[in-house]
C-alpha cells in the first residue's frame, strides 16, 4: 500500500505471508536508470509481518515507480505500482495544484467462517476498481475500514487477523498499490459496536491502527493528526479514544476530549489553507440526537461550532462516515461563513436508509440511501477563486450527484 506523501518522502506499507527481509527499489518515471532503495526491514510474525518502508530523499512534484523485494527477489508486479511527491507551489506563478481525492467509509469484508449474519453483509468489492478508475491522487478512509468481529476484539492476534483479512481482498490490491492512503477510525475498527474510552483493548486498537495504516503523524495518545495537500489542510480526528459512553449521561461528556478539541481549534485558527477538511468517524452537523451523532455531545459541539464562528474561520468542510447512507449537510444560520458536512457511506457494507430521520440541514438531492457508494472531491482553480467539485458515484462508477462549493 502507498501511504502518506510529502515533497521529500513517501511511506510504503508492505505485508509478507511469513517473516522476510523486504525493501523497495524506486525511480522517477523521467529517470528510469537512476534507481534508489529504501532501508531493509525484517518483518516479524508478532507484528503481522508488516513493514513500513520510507522512500527518501525524493524530488518534489515527481511520479515514481517502485518494486518490492522480498528476500532479495523482486515481487511480481500484478498492478501499476507508483507514488507521487507533492509539488512546490508557494510563491510560484502557477499557484497550488489541482487535485482530486476519493473518500468513503464502512468497508465490510465477508468472512463466512466467523460471520453470523443470515446473508452476506458485505459485497460489491468492484467498487474499489471504480474508485481507481476516477484517478484520485489519494484515498481518505473515514472509519469502519474494517469490521472487528467477536473473536477479534479481545486479542492482539484477533486484530491482526481482521486487518490482514480485509487488506487481502483481491479487488482492493490495485487501489492500494498506486494511490496514496490516509485513514481515521470509528467503532468497528476500534472495538465492539459503539465502543468508547472504556474499551479494555483500546491500547491494542491504537497500536494496530498505526501498524496497518501509514498516516504521516499521530498524537501521542489516540490517532488524530493532520496533513496538507497543496493549499488544503486535512485534520484527521479520533472519535473513540476519549469518548464518554453513550449510556453515561452524567455531564461533562466527552467526544473528542478537551486536549484534542483545543488542538483542532488552534489548528483551524492557524491554518492558512484555502479549504480545511475535518475528517470524523461520525456525523458532526446533523442536529438530530440519533445513534452516535456529535449532537449527543452538545457541550463539545457547541464549543467547536462557536469557535469556528467567533474566529471567522472560512471554508470548513467536515468529512464523515458511519451512517450507511450519504448526504451533504449545510449550516449557514448564525455563521459568518457556511460550514458543510459530507457524509459518505457505505463502501462495501449494506446501506441503511434513515426512514424516519429528517436531517433539516440536508441539501435536497444529496441523500443516497439505497446503494453502496463513494465520493470524489476535486480541488481546482486559481487563487483566490478555488472551487470544490463533490461527486458521488455508485459501485460501478456512475455519477449520482454533483455539488460545487466556491472558496470564500
Image: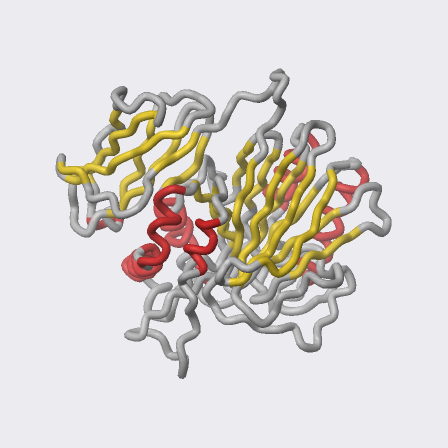
User: Which residue is rendered at x = 82% and y = 50% of the image?
Assistant: 332
Decide which of 196, 340 is in the foreground and name it.
Answer: 340
Decide which of 153, 330 is in the foreground and name it.
Answer: 330
- Can residue 273 be seen at all in this image of the molecule? yes
* Residue 346 spot, x, y in % from top left: 52, 63
Q: Quadrant of residue 147?
A: bottom left
The reply, left or right, for residue 89 in relation to residue 266 is left
How many dots with numbers?
0
* Residue 358 spot, x, y in % from top left: 74, 70
Q: Quadrant of the N terminus?
A: top left
Decide which of 200, 179 is in the foreground and name it.
Answer: 179
Establish if 322 lies above or below 63.
below
Q: Quadrant of residue 230?
A: top right
- Can residue 222 be seen at all in this image of the molecule? no
Establish if 107 lies above or below 121.
above
Q: Residue furthest right?
A: 334
User: Which residue is rendered at x = 37% and y = 55% of the image?
Assistant: 172
The reply, left or right, for residue 171 in relation to residue 315 is left
Q: Colour scheme used in the picture?
A: secondary structure
Q: Quadrant of the C terminus?
A: top right
Decide which of 30, 221 is in the foreground and name it.
Answer: 30
Establish if 309 lies above or below 98.
below
Q: Quadrant of residue 96?
A: top right
Q: Residue furthest bottom?
A: 118
The reply, left or right, for residue 304 in relation to residue 292 is right
* Residue 315 spot, x, y in % from top left: 72, 40
Establish if 386 lies above or below 290.
above
Amino acid at each position: 500500500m502507498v501511504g502518506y506523501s510529502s515533497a521529500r518522502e513517501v511511506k510504503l506499507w508492505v505485508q509478507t505471508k511469513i517473516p522476510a527481509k523486504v525493501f523497495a527499489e524506486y525511480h522517477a518515471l523521467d529517470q528510469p536508470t537512476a534507481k534508489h532503495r529504501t532501508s531493509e526491514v525484517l518483518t516479524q510474525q508478532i507484528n503481522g509481518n508488516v513493514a513500513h518502508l520510507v522512500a527518501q530523499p525524493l524530488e518534489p512534484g515527481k511520479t515514481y515507480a517502485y518494486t518490492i523485494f522480498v528476500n532479495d527477489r523482486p515481487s511480481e508486479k500484478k498492478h501499476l505500482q507508483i507514488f507521487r511527491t507533492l509539488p512546490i507551489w508557494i510563491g510560484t506563478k502557477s499557484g497550488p495544484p489541482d487535485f482530486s481525492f476519493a473518500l468513503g467509509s464502512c468497508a465490510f469484508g465477508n468472512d463466512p467462517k466467523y460471520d453470523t449474519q443470515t446473508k452476506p453483509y458485505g459485497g460489491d468489492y468492484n467498487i474499489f476498481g471504480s474508485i481507481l478508475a476516477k484517478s484520485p491522487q489519494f484515498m481518505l478512509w473515514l472509519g469502519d475500514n474494517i469490521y472487528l468481529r467477536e473473536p477479534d476484539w479481545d486479542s492482539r492476534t484477533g486484530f491482526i487477523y481482521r486487518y490482514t483479512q480485509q487488506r487481502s481482498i483481491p479487488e482492493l490490491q490495485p487501489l492500494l498499490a498506486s494511490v496514496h492512503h490516509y485513514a481515521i477510525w470509528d467503532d468497528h475498527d476500534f472495538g465492539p459496536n459503539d465502543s468508547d474510552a472504556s474499551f479494555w483493548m483500546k491500547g491494542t486498537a491504537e497500536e494496530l491502527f498505526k501498524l496497518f495504516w501509514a498516516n504521516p503523524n499521530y498524537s501521542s495518545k489516540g490517532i488524530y493528526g493532520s496533513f496538507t495537500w497543496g493549499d488544503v489542510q486535512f485534520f484527521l480526528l479520533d472519535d473513540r479514544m476519549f469518548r464518554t459512553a453513550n449510556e453515561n449521561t452524567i455531564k461533562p461528556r466527552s467526544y473528542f476530549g478537551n486536549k484534542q478539541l483545543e488542538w483542532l481549534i488552534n489548528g483551524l485558527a492557524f491554518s492558512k489553507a484555502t479549504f480545511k477538511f475535518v475528517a470524523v468517524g461520525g456525523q458532526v452537523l446533523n442536529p438530530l440526537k440519533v445513534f452516535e451523532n456529535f449532537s449527543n455531545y452538545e457541550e463539545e459541539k457547541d464549543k467547536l461550532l462557536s469557535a469556528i464562528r467567533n474566529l471567522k474561520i472560512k471554508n470548513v468542510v467536515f468529512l464523515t462516515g458511519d451512517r450507511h447512507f450519504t448526504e451533504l449537510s449545510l449550516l449557514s444560520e448564525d455563521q459568518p461563513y457556511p460550514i458543510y458536512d459530507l457524509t459518505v457511506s457505505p463502501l462495501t457494507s449494506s446501506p441503511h436508509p434513515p426512514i424516519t430521520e429528517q436531517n433539516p440541514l440536508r441539501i435536497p438531492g444529496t441523500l443516497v440511501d439505497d446503494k453502496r457508494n463513494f465520493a470524489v472531491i476535486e480541488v481546482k482553480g486559481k487563487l483566490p477563486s478555488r472551487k470544490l467539485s463533490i461527486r458521488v458515484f455508485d459501485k460501478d462508477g456512475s455519477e449520482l450527484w454533483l455539488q460545487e462549493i466556491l472558496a470564500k
